[in-house]
Structures are given as C-alpha cells and as structure tokens.
Amino acid sequence: MKSIVKLCSLTNNTSNFSKNFVLTLTLTSLLSCGFGLSANYAAEAIPHAEQIQSQSPHRSNRLPRAVARAVLRDASKRSGQAIANLKITQFKSQTFGNPCIFNFGEICTREYNPIKGWQVIVRVQQQFWTYHVNQSGSQIVLDPKANVSGATQLPKAIADAILGDASKRSGVATTDLKITQATPKTFGNPCQFNFGEICTQQFDPVEGWEVIVRIKKQSWTYHVNQSGSQIVLDPQVRATSKS
C-alpha cells in the first residue's frame, strides 16, 4: 500500500515538473519572439546612416566665406552701406560657358572656355544685386544693369582729385565747386570710359564712377576709374583755364 502511495506521489511530481517545464519554455519562446519583433520594428523605423548622409547637402555647394566676404565688401564700397546692413540672399555654383558670359555680355560667341564659379545675389536696401564670381573670389563682376545709384558715397580722395582737376581747368576755387551727382558705373570697355562716340561691342569692363560737377552755371561730367588713377572729362565740355 505504501509503495502505491509513493508511486502516485512520484507520478504527480513528474507531472508538475513537466507542466512547469512546458510553461517556462512557452514563456521563453514568447518573450524571444516579442523582442525579435521589437528589434525588427526599430530597425525599420530608423533610417540607415548612409541614407542620412546622402540627404545632407554637399560641402562643395556651400559658398566659401572668403568669396562671401569679397562680394559683401564690393557691395559695401559701391553702395556706401555698412556690411552689417547687407545680406546674401541667394547663391549657386555655376559654370559659365566663357568669359563673355561671366562678364554679363549680352552678345557672346558659342566658344566654350568655361569659368567655374558662383552666382551671388546681395540685398542692398530694397534692391537685389547679381554678382558673378570665379571660384577663388579673385574676379568679382556686378551685373551692369544693377541700379547702384542712390545711397552711394564717392570716396573723399576721388572727390578731391576731381574737384582739383575741375578747379585747374576752370580757374574756379575748389570751395566754389560742388559735386552734384556721383554714380558708380561699369563702363563696357575703355572706349566708353573715355567718352568714345563710336565704340565696338567688345566687353572689357572698367569699374568706376560717373561724376557731375557744378561750375557756376555749367555741369561738367567726369568718368573716373575705381582707384581714382584715371580721370577723364567729357570732351564736349568747354573748359577754359585761367591759370
């Protein structure tokens, strides 16, 4: 009788052990499956690092700081505005087909002599100026159609040189002369800069100013280059020196 009781007890213990083992195995399998699903979901939800890098902008398409500074300095000099008041609103890398296109030529040949660089747009007060700049920033050309008149100041050294020339030609003291207008200008070529009446279409720009000086009841027109080293009086002006 005792042997039968022990056998029954052993059988029950074995049965409980089997149930516990099966239950544990089932829970382990379920947990493993659950973690596997979570891991797969996370992997699909997060893009790969390679994809993120490919979506980021290339550094080569960023305007170099040196080029940006050079353009802003030029715009500041032409407009008389502080650099802090100017803003580059747009830029793009560009390959200009040839120097004529780079220099905003209206009539250009189809010659392919590429210049790699940038097209840069600068906001100057209520205006937008378009620049062409080569890759290194050593060549900066402003669209000659840009309206640069208005809040522009003629450098004092150039103003003094022009007044000195006008005084010498007219015999009138510089204190009695007045610059009534000074307009930054891109002359198409040296012929136009020198008031040529018949000039070729060649585009060989001369950066400078058109300056009007009031002398008594007359107005004299001068062309002066950017550095002030070349000052040309309109040959139609009748200037008689009294010196």
Image (tube, rainbow, N blue to C red):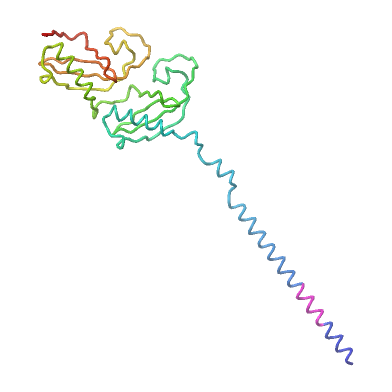
Residue positioned 31% across, 16% down in the render: 187
Mainly helix, strand or loop, the magenta region? helix
Magenta range is: 12-21
Rendered view: 139 above or below 81: above
Residue positioned 88% across, 89% down in the render: 4
Q: Position of residue 214 (x, y in %)?
A: 14, 18
Outermost residue, bottom direction?
A: 1
Q: Position of residue 26 (x, y in %)?
A: 73, 69
The question of residue 13 being in magenta is answered with yes
Q: Position of residue 156 (x, y in %)?
A: 21, 24
The question of residue 170 being in magenta is answered with no
Say which quadrant the N terminus sits in: bottom right
Say which quadrant the C terminus sits in: top left
The quadrant in which residue 227 appears is top left
The quadrant in which residue 134 appears is top left
Q: Position of residue 87 (x, y in %)?
A: 34, 36
Rendered view: 71 above or below 186: below
Residue positioned 17% across, 22% down in the render: 180
Q: Nearer the viewer, residue 164 or 63?
A: 164
7 sits left or right of 47 in the view: right
Q: How many marks?
A: 0
